[in-house]
């Protein structure tokens, strides 16, 4: 048995001593290759849907609720210092529990967590250049995270030398450790719903809302998606500040975070009960198959940003990539594609009203390459006459997606401008993939190539519709065409998708 396998067995023994239960006849954990951290779970026998793989006491999860640090600091100080907002509190708890060493309940668990990451948060400037054209770098939130560390977390640490000895700060409470703990949460945590019957009322089993950072921020902004990312949180998670404070605990869940994930493979999911969590199969699993606890079929841009990997599968139309890829088009780029004849004052008035009416400032193209309805709606607003615009505003209702040549001209210009944001062409990227590449460069190429293929398909779609309109008799050109697709939110995570992992 290798040293890594010995460490894994030691951790599993700790888990069972802490009250966790594993069906060792049905599932085993192992390393799949020599790559560090490449571990997961495999079925040891055929299992039906609903089979309980393992059970985790709530007391064994690591959260601000279970760590003793918030009580030692005091509830008033904890809230005054905003440790109850976002991830700052959990990061501090994880730092503190690590500093306690053997006296921490989670010491053996914490030792199993990664200390290095392949996520862009830890890339240097040269590597980040490979992501130019994607919006991945804008969503890292590194500067805002470091601001929170310096202005929020570090002052708390320095104010209590009885809890945080001065000689431990340079070891356990550094900026580097802050990023490591934040990345552990981003890649491995679950949103564990709190049991409403905690005082003794019985409830039926419910599925855990297990989205990595689950209900924290998921904000898309036109220029910097990380602007409201104060606590090393996932800047794409939209419900953080609006979430009821007591609905969920962002938690590290031992053993559950050992399961891997891949597009379209989920066969297990975490469920919660009053005092424990259970991992159950969601479909029949054959002996020898890997057990996957997927967090939603995310695009490669999110997979790379959160977990440091991409999914590369055979695509329905040929080639390889991620069937769940999307590409974002910011509304400010659409504005740049407008004809110069539209007054700037009108443009600003429309943007303000559009946003007030719930319009999105980021438009999303999916793998089917259809034109998003909100994109067509936004452009249509700019093309309305003053009288038509006033009528729409008076009704307080966005106009229908009437597709015509002027609208499609703007769509095509915007897509061409978006494509030009990438420094390489599709052909360049395909050629690069045939060479010897570092893992970071390879992953970055798959991210940008997936996005560019969608843009190219959407561009071809828009040009085809315009050609069709040009060939139609004039009395039929005003009919609505295409683009009635409902826009999917850029948060691909879904309220019950998996933790932020790998």
Image (cartoon, grey):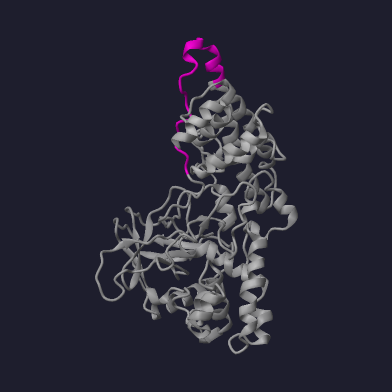
Residue drawn at x 34%, y 67% is: 25
53 shown above or below 372:
below
* Residue pictured at 45% horizontal, 55% vertical: 295
- Residue 297 in the image: above or below residue 485: below
Magenta-tinted stretch:
466-488
Give the left or right position of residue 364, taking residue 485 as reference.
right
Q: Using the image as rendered, state which of residue 488 and residue 332 is in the foreground.
A: 332
Membership of 482 in magenta stretch: yes
**Does residue 181 appear in this view?**
yes
Q: In this view, does 46 lie above or below 68?
A: above
Q: In the displayed structure, does residue 318 sit left or right of residue 26?
A: right
Residue 17 screen position, x and y as percent: 40, 81
Question: Is residue 326 something one can see in this rendering?
Answer: no
Queried whether the magenta region covers residue 265, the answer comes back as no
Q: Farthest residue in the right direction?
A: 126
- Left or right of residue 117, residue 24 in this image: left
Label count reads 0
Q: Which residue is pictured at 69% across the width and 36% down the height?
A: 420
Residue closest to the eye, 404 or 185: 404
Q: Position of residue 254 (x, y in %)?
A: 45, 71
Q: Which residue is drawn at 56% across and 84% down?
A: 101
């Amino acid at each position: 048995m290798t040293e890594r396998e010995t460490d894994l067995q030691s951790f599993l023994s700790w888990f069972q001593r802490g009250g966790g239960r594993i069906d060792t006849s049905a599932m085993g954990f192992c390393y799949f290759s020599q790559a560090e951290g490449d571990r997961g779970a495999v079925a040891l026998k055929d299992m039906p849907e609903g089979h309980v793989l393992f059970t985790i006491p709530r007391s064994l999860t690591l959260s601000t609720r279970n760590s003793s640090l918030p009580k030692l600091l005091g509830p008033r100080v904890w809230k005054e210092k905003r440790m109850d907002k976002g991830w700052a509190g959990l990061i501090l708890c994880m730092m503190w529990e690590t500093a306690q060493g053997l006296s921490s309940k989670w010491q053996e668990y914490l030792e199993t967590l990664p200390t290095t990451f392949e996520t862009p948060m830890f890339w240097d400037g040269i590597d980040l250049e490979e992501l130019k054209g994607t919006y991945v770098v804008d969503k890292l939130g590194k500067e805002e995270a470091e601001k929170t560390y310096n202005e929020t977390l570090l002052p708390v640490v320095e104010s209590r030398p009885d809890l945080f000895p001065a000689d431990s700060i340079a070891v356990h409470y550094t900026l580097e450790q802050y990023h490591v703990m934040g990345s552990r949460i981003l890649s491995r945590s679950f949103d564990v719903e709190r049991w409403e019957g905690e005082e003794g009322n019985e409830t039926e089993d419910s599925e855990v809302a297990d989205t990595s950072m689950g209900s924290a921020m998921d904000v898309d902004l036109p220029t910097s998606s990380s602007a409201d990312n104060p606590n090393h949180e996932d800047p794409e998670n939209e419900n953080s500040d609006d979430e009821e404070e007591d609905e969920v605990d962002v938690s590290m869940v031992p053993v559950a975070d050992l399961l891997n994930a891949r597009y379209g493979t989920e066969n297990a999911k975490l469920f919660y009960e009053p005092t424990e969590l259970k991992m159950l199969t969601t479909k029949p699993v054959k002996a020898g198959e890997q057990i996957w606890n997927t967090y939603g079929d995310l695009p490669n841009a999110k997979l790379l940003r959160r977990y440091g990997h991409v999914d590369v599968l055979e695509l329905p139309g040929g080639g390889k990539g991620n069937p769940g890829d999307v590409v974002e088009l910011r509304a400010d780029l659409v504005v740049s594609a407008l004809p110069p004849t539209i007054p700037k004052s009108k443009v600003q008035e429309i943007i303000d009203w559009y946003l007030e009416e719930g319009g999105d400032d980021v438009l999303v193209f999916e793998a089917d390459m259809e034109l998003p309805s909100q994109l067509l709606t936004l452009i249509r607003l700019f093309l309305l006459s003053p009288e038509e615009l006033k009528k729409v505003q008076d009704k307080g209702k966005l106009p229908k997606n009437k597709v015509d040549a002027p609208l499609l001209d703007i769509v095509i210009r915007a897509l061409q401008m978006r494509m030009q944001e990438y420094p390489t062409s599709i052909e360049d990227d395909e050629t690069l993939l045939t060479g010897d590449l570092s893992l970071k460069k390879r992953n970055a190429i798959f991210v940008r190539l997936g996005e560019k293929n969608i843009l190219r398909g959407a561009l071809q779609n828009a040009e085809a519709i315009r050609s069709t309109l040009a060939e139609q008799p004039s009395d039929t050109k005003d009919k609505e065409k295409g683009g009635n697709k409902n826009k999917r939110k850029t948060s691909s995570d879904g309220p019950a998708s998996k933790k932020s992992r790998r």
